[in-house]
Amino acid sequence: MSVIVLGSMAFDKIETPFGKTDKIVGGAATYIAWSASNFTRPIQQISVVGADFPPEELSVLEARGVLLEGVQVNKEKKSFFWHGRYHLDMNTRDTLETQLNALGDFVPVVPPSYQGADILMLGNLAPAVQLSVVEQLTERPKLIVLDTMNFWMETAMPDLEKVLKKVDILLVNDSEARQLSGQYSLVRAAREIMKMGPKRLIIKKGEHGALLFQEDHVFFAPALPIDEVFDPTGAGDSFAGGFVGYLDSTKDFSFDGLKSAIIIGSAIASFCVEKFGTTRLRELTRQDIDKRIRQFIELVNFDIALV
Ligand code: AMP
């Protein structure tokens, strides 16, 4: 059992209406690894960090079963840095600063020991970098999942089109699905996107849950209404991590299997937003996760008599 995870490992500076942080450890692959390792190990990480990335952060990940052979340390550069500010609705944010640093000239190298993984999770990065990892795998993983964002649709669409043809599942949010397809209706958007390559599509709608599409089937997973959303950073990546980690543990890639996995992804994302950065993910216990999954079951469980 193993999952390859590609993505950024970074420093983030985050401002929300409830507080702000100095530089804290973040990055899509960091959130994905913390989340997925609740369900499966090892996680085979591919990323790059700069000379400033704290070695103890790498050690705690290793202790979690995250293999770092594919994580390059660029001693000449700093780590990727992202500074974001959330609006009052906590669903939208502005990027105030992005410093690519070590990520700017990142050429991923898949270590030979990673070959043969069942799942490849391509976190949000330049589509050319994502494609390079797919092409380095000698055996196609059973499941390839892709995350992307509007920025790549605007700046690297030809590469994105190429990588879309190689993946099984695409994860995007609702505005990105509309942008990619040119359709307002999410049902029509899904139909158009599934013609571009992925046979399954997950559209995340922040606090309004997520939709799973496959052919003419649709499934809706709610987001748990939370008392206090503190910091949404990494929620999408935690969703992805919970999703692929759980799928690697069940190996059930059927539509029903994916339905369970998006509930798990939603549950892990609901923890992520409760504290700044990866703080909440680091404290999670199996009991916390099981309790939250039961809350999800309660949330959508009802009896109705048809008259
Ligand atoms: P999410 O909130 O799930 O969209 O992911 C937030 C994480 O994505 C942060 O920890 C950032 O470090 C990382 N991130 C933001 N912009 C980029 C980018 N252009 N490329 C790679 N990672 C990014």
Image (cartoon, helix red, strand yellow):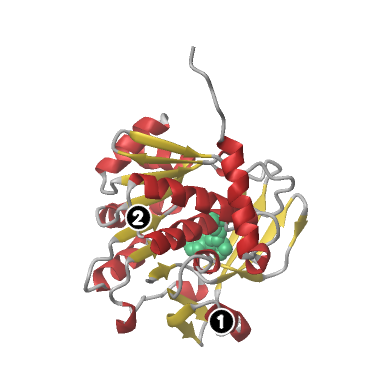
Question: Secondary structure under badge 2?
Answer: loop
**Total numbered labels:** 2
Few, some or many residues within 10 Å of mark 2 (<14, 14–19, 20+): some
The amino acid type of the residue labelled 2 equals Asp
The amino acid type of the residue labelled 1 equals Ala
Residue 98 visible (yes or no) = no
Q: Residue at x 69, y 55 (%)?
A: 274
Residue bearing the label numbered 2: 252
Q: Is residue 55 left or right of residue 306?
A: right
Position of 169 relative to 207 (above/below) = below
Q: Residue at x 70, y 49 (%)?
A: 229
The one of 10 and 56 positioned closer to us in this rendering: 56
Mark 2 vs 1, N-terminal side: 1
Tell us which disc is closer to us: 2 or 1: 2
- Label 2 CB less than 8 angstroms from ligand 1: no
The one of 176 and 1 positioned closer to us in this rendering: 1
Task: Estimate the x, y position of residue 265 in percent, counting from the top left.
Answer: 51, 53
Question: Secondary structure under badge 1?
Answer: helix
Q: Are marks 2 and 1 in contact (CB under 8 Å)?
A: no
The one of 240 and 249 positioned closer to us in this rendering: 249
Task: Estimate the x, y position of residue 78 in percent, counting from the top left.
Answer: 56, 79
Q: Quadrant of residue 70?
A: bottom left
Task: Estimate the x, y position of residue 273 in percent, counting from the top left.
Answer: 65, 54
Position of 70 relative to 10 (above/below) = below
Task: Estimate the x, y position of residue 76 in percent, counting from the top left.
Answer: 50, 86
Q: Is residue 201 left or right of residue 262?
A: left
Residue 218 visible (yes or no) = yes
Q: Residue at x 36, y 75 (%)?
A: 108
Position of 165 relative to 278 (above/below) = above
Residue bearing the label numbered 1: 63
Q: Is residue 201 left or right of residue 97?
A: left
